Image (spheres, coloured by chain):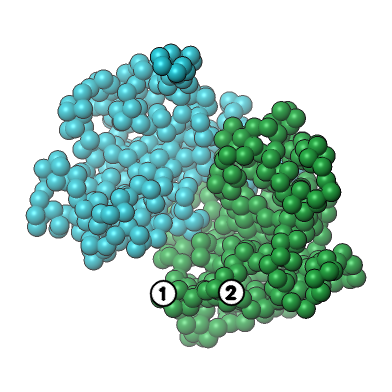
Chain colours: A green, B cyan
């Protein structure tokens, strides 16, 4: 509430500093069974033109992190701590109406399910026009419509002039997701949050949408946060990666760090369990045993401890997210094993993995 | 995952599908419904499945792979064509005559949230068909169901729980237990892992693999993820627009695809290796 209401909530006066800066973000929800700490200390920075991937299983806190950035998790039962700064402006303390001006125009979000994230009773065009006019009253209906057509063309929808008057059900899944992206881009935001944007789509469509996001990211200098559970998708588009588990970031580094020198056993497990078309198939698929822990009842110490075959005494203490590799301060992880131990332990039959599949 | 040669008798396929067609009418008109067109969901599909092997069916949504399964199982009436199970024609059989066949052929569904009745307990979900088919009842039924739950990696104490108490991976295990309760010979797996987290996918794929070895099952495995299909299948059939465009040995189809559509499917699968994936993008041109 510190900003005066007259000033625009976010000033594009970027003097140095990152575009988006998240510091010690913690999000908890009060439930009947107690407080759930969905996000427990997430920090990252995002620069223009960069794709940051947040990877994790359901319940790892990746979606809650993203939703909190634009204030979607605010509610009477939620506790939000930490700071989210966009060009130096604190977002967590903005009022709902100030935040509304940030949403769409500064930070846009696209969701997993393009079926349910559009209103079925309005045409696609109407929904894009609504987004434009909600933020820019001076734009006439005609201008907004022209802009909507332009946007649909930009995301590769053929015959956009006619399609703009179609209803969502007349679009295929891939086209609907393209339309969602067009809507997200309508106000030329500087940050795009894509929450599992391709999970509901076929592989061929997935490839197209990923390339679209990548192109937009390059041509418009859009900073993108990509949330996914699929490391294959990450390998295609991301620059930097955060791996989340049980509400915490367990490893973070560049794309190359995560794929070729992963430090956390959970990352090994994720990499190991992927099916590879470019390699001979293994007899059995390596798996991570057990299930993700309940956030109500996280194991003491390292949250991955109960599923980790390399657990030892020290794991009952929570490891910090520290740089453990000499000479690489940006590659950090939460695992007590030494880098030398990790190097030997993660080598499973010549590939990176958690452990050799038994049986 | 080569199938055991002892159980394969190449002379008699377990399932033989010849020229299967399923068209859905598109109707129009206010008072009198007139058929104006047809959706050719399955348009002349032929394949065989041998005992003990896994046939993978791949294709995008709308390619007709799920409809094919449903028509083969006679859950949908085929427009034309023949489906032979163990040499016996089953297309066009009456409901009552199909009932004994349900013991032989079962299905595992994609969505572990929608395919379990939320008001029934796990014991009932898995055991009901044993009761309907008069295989077991009372104490014996309970013992049987508990055995099944253990076999799929759940615990017998889960007998009295409700579906909402389970995670996605556990629910899929319940779906598998239900499909296996009657000791079927042939199981259709319709996208059984696509709704699950990556680490759980591997668990379910391995479980299906183990059960196949233990119980001598034959699978028809349907998925849009050709990576998973290749892992589990002996042979793969690729479907597009209601037709099989390419079929053959799993490694052969993935490594030396002949059909353009198969090539397109393979090229779209993300390679979980940044250097490889960049190299491929450069080979095939910037946009895919």
Q: Is residue B199 left or right of residue A151?
A: left
> Who's the residue at 21% across and 53% down the image?
B124
Q: Is disc 1 in the same subunit as disc 2?
A: yes
Q: At x 87% / y 64%, what residue is drawn?
A: A12
Q: Which residue is mark 2?
A: A27
State which quadrant residue A88 falls in: bottom right
Q: Nearer the viewer, residue A133 or A21?
A: A133
Q: Which mark is residue A354?
A: none
Mark 1, Cα crowd under 10 Å, few <14 / some 14-19 / many 20+, is few
Residue B152: image location, x then y, percent: 30, 56
Q: Earlier in the sequence, mark 1 or mark 2?
A: 2
The spot of residue A50 in percent (x, y) is 78, 58
Chain of the residue that carries numbered disc 1 in the rendered image: A
Is residue B272 among the parts visible in the rendering?
no
Confirm whether residue B98 shows in the render: yes
Foreground mark, 1 or 2?
Answer: 1
**Local SS, label 2:** strand
Chain name for mark 2: A
The CA span between labels 1 and 2 is: 17 Å
- Image: A105 above or below B58: below
Q: Which residue is mark 1?
A: A32
Q: Residue at x 31, y 54 (%)?
A: B118
């Amino acid at each position: 509430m510190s900003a005066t209401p007259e000033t625009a909530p976010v000033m594009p006066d970027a003097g140095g500093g990152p575009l988006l800066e998240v510091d010690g973000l913690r999000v908890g929800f009060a439930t009947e069974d107690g407080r759930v700490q969905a996000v427990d200390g997430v920090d990252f920075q995002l620069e223009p033109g960069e794709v940051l991937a947040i990877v994790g299983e359901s319940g790892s806190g990746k979606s809650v992190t993203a939703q909190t950035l634009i204030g979607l998790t605010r509610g009477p039962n939620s506790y939000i701590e930490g700071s989210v700064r966009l060009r130096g402006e604190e977002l967590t303390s903005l009022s709902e109406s100030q935040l509304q001006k940030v949403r769409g125009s500064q930070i846009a979000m696209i969701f997993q399910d393009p079926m349910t994230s559009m209103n079925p009773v309005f045409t696609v065009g109407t929904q894009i026009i609504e987004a434009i006019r909600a933020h820019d009253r001076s734009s006439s209906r005609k201008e907004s419509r022209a802009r909507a057509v332009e946007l649909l063309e930009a995301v590769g929808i053929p015959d956009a002039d006619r399609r703009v008057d179609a209803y969502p059900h007349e679009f295929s899944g891939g086209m609907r997701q393209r339309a969602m992206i067009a809507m997200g881009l309508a106000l030329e935001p500087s940050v795009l949050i894509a929450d599992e944007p391709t999970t509901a789509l076929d592989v061929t469509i997935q490839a197209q949408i990923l390339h679209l996001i990548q192109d937009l990211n390059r041509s418009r200098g859009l900073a993108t946060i990509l949330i996914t559970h699929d490391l294959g998708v990450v390998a295609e588009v991301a620059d930097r990666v955060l791996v989340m588990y049980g509400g915490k970031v367990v490893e973070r580094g560049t794309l190359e760090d995560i794929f070729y020198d992963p430090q956390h056993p959970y990352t090994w497990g994720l990499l190991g369990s992927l099916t590879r078309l470019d390699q001979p198939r293994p007899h059995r698929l390596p798996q991570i045993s057990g299930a993700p822990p309940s956030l109500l009842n996280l194991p003491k110490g390292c949250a991955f401890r109960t599923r980790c075959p390399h657990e030892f005494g020290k794991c009952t203490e929570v490891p910090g997210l520290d740089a453990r590799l000499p000479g690489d301060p940006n590659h950090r992880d939460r695992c007590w094993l030494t880098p030398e131990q990790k190097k030997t332990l993660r080598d499973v039959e010549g590939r990176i993995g958690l452990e050799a599949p038994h049986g | 995952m080569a199938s055991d040669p002892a159980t394969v008798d190449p002379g008699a396929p377990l399932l033989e599908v010849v020229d299967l067609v399923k068209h859905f009418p598109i109707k129009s008109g206010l008072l009198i419904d007139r058929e104006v067109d047809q959706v050719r969901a399955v348009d002349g599909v032929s394949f065989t499945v041998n005992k003990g092997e896994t046939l993978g069916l791949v294709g995008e949504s709308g390619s007709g792979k799920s409809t094919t399964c449903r028509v083969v199982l006679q859950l949908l009436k085929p427009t034309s064509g023949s489906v032979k199970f163990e040499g016996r024609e089953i297309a066009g059989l009456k409901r009552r005559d199909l009932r004994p066949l349900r013991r032989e052929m079962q299905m595992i569904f994609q969505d572990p949230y929608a395919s379990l009745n939320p008001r029934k307990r796990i014991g009932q979900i898995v055991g009901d068909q044993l009761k309907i088919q008069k295989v077991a009842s009372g104490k014996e039924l309970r013992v049987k169901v508990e055995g099944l739950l253990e076999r799929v990696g759940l615990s017998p104490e889960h007998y009295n729980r409700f579906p909402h108490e389970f995670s996605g991976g556990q629910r899929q295990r319940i779906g598998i237990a239900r499909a296996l309760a009657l000791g079927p010979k042939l199981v259709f797996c319709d996208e059984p892992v696509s709704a699950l987290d990556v680490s759980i996918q591997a668990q379910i794929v391995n479980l299906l693999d183990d059960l196949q070895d233990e119980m001598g099952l034959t699978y028809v495995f349907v998925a849009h993820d050709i990576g998973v299909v290749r892992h589990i299948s002996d042979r793969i059939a690729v479907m597009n627009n209601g037709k099989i465009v390419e079929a053959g040995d799993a490694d052969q189809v993935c490594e030396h695809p002949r059909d353009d559509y198969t090539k397109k499917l393979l090229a779209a699968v993300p390679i979980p290796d940044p250097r490889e994936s960049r190299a491929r993008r450069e080979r095939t041109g910037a946009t895919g």
